[in-house]
Amino acid sequence: MTSPRTTNLSLVDTDPAELAVDAIVIGVHSQTGEQDATSGLAGTLLLASGAESIAAAFDGKLTETLALLGATGGPGEVIKLATLGTVTAPLVAAVGLGPEPSGAAPAPEVLRRAAGAAIRALAGASRVALAMPLPDDTDASAELRAVAEGALLGGYRFAGYKTRPQPTRREPVTEVLIAVPDAGDAGAQAEVTRAQVVAGAVRLTRDWVNTAPNELRPPSFADAVAAAARDAGLGVEVLDEAELAAGGYGGIVAVGQGSEAPPRLVKLTYTPQDGGNGKRVALVGKGITFDTGGISIKPAQGMWEMKSDMGGAAAVGAAMLAIAALKPAVAVSAYLPMAENMPSGTSYRPGDVITMYNGKRVEVLNTDAEGRMILGDAMARACEDGTDYLFETSTLTGGQVVALGKRVAGVMGTPELCERVQAVGDAVGEPAWPMPLPDDVRKGMESDVADISQVNAGMDRAGHMLQGGVFLREFVTDDVAWAHIDIAGPSYHSGEPTGYWTKGGTGVPVRMLVQLVEDVAANG
């Protein structure tokens, strides 16, 4: 299943008050203050830049009217106001931006979330304009990119599987115009093009994650990724179950053998024109299309969300499509190990010893620690093929959610590369926090019969996120800088829509991965 339609995006430099659209979005800031003796309102609103002509059309009474309607300017709040002919658009939507920043435009992530919230709230309108606060200078690329991405992602809706029309369901906005000082500026146009490419990859990731698990098992997931990659001009290699067994991919085979839908390993290759800058990047993503826990079965409550356990592979596959379109000057290979972790008479068991692709032998203590098994094989293959930087992402541990919550990923690996991941994550609105890989965690994973056990030998869940990172380190060669990005929380949003996140798959960390690749292309 895929989202039924996308949102078209373009730039305009027409006066926002004169735009022929169904609605126009403006920004408002909150401002605390003494209670107004006339209106009785505790505090006032401040209009953000970009809304000047709209305010003039309302004879200076726009903020007062919005306040009477309950507007506070809080982040993400959307208040709608009929214009009654004061401007061309029949509706004004004021989106909250929080307190006014001192001497600068709002932070890009504030604008990204505001644009997403506004476009989602205006479902049912066809054509919407955004008159958001964007700097007038040439350094406004980060703010423009944020507004464009937020609008495109806030307008996402998964097609779903309902068989009857829903009379009350309003269709997403189909066209968004962003008001800028110069719509013909080449830099601004380039930002819109990039936003469309990257947001398209995020939307595809969301589609894959939101698809029902009976419709996206390892063979069909591999086919979908391979077909999209070939259309994008990427090199494609798909290993089936027989080739995986013959090639020594013990971890992928072991996890996948419990399901009638056999495992796959998909490799995608992007080769830059003129050879690029000489650096090589490897991306690895966990592709467990459904995770029951296997023999070590999970509790039933909430298990339906385990359809999202392939979020890492979905993000990596979709990021490669964006990379193919953006054409950075660096070679990139992606490895997507895919399996379905099911309990059956052929499942791998606690106590099994598995020989991994790099020859290391792993004692299985918990079949629900399956992600690290398939990732170990893929990471070892990536190192064997040759790379300078390895970025791996996965919905690996519940420990990530316990430690860092649902918005911040954990990142472990080479310290310098983890700092790079953190900086890029902050810049694109997909934050990650560096975590340690202590020696005592590795000591607790010693096995009496093999080179390493999957988890702490005492089944102690303390430092569970770190155990995953420590295990994966065993499959990275010493000459490769690497980062493991645990997205167990940020990859799937089970609550109400917020900002540019809709319910379900979020598409994290597509934007981070694309930016990391571009950073390596630019800076080595």
Image: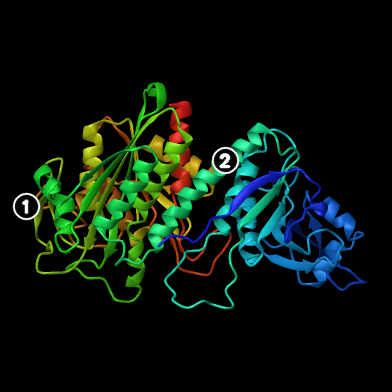
70 above or below 228?
A: below
Residue kind at label 1, given as amino acid type: Val
- Pick the residue in front: 150 or 498: 150
Residue at image point 45% right, 60% down: 405
Q: Mark 2 points at which residue?
A: 193
Q: In the image, 160: left or right of 352?
A: right
Distance between mark 2 and mark 1 Cα atoms: 55 Å
| Place of residue 143 in the rendered image (x, y in percent of width and height, measured from the top left) | 65, 43
Furthest-top residue in view?
274
**Quadrant of the image containing the C terminus:** top left
Q: Position of residue 512 (x, y in %)?
A: 46, 44
Q: Which of 366 and 204 is in front in this view?
A: 204
Compared to residue 108, the image places residue 417 above or below, namely above
396 vs 121, left or right, is left
- Tell me, yes or no, if residue 134 can be seen here: yes
Q: Residue shown at 23%/32% (left/top)?
A: 385
| Quadrant in the picture for the N terminus | bottom left
Amino acid at the residue labelled 2 = Thr
Q: Quadrant of residue 473?
A: top left
Q: Nearer the viewer, residue 185 or 313?
A: 185
Circle 1 is placed at which residue position? 449
Kindly tell me whether residue 420 is visible in this rendering: no
| Contact flag, marks 2 and 1 (Cβ < 8 Å) | no
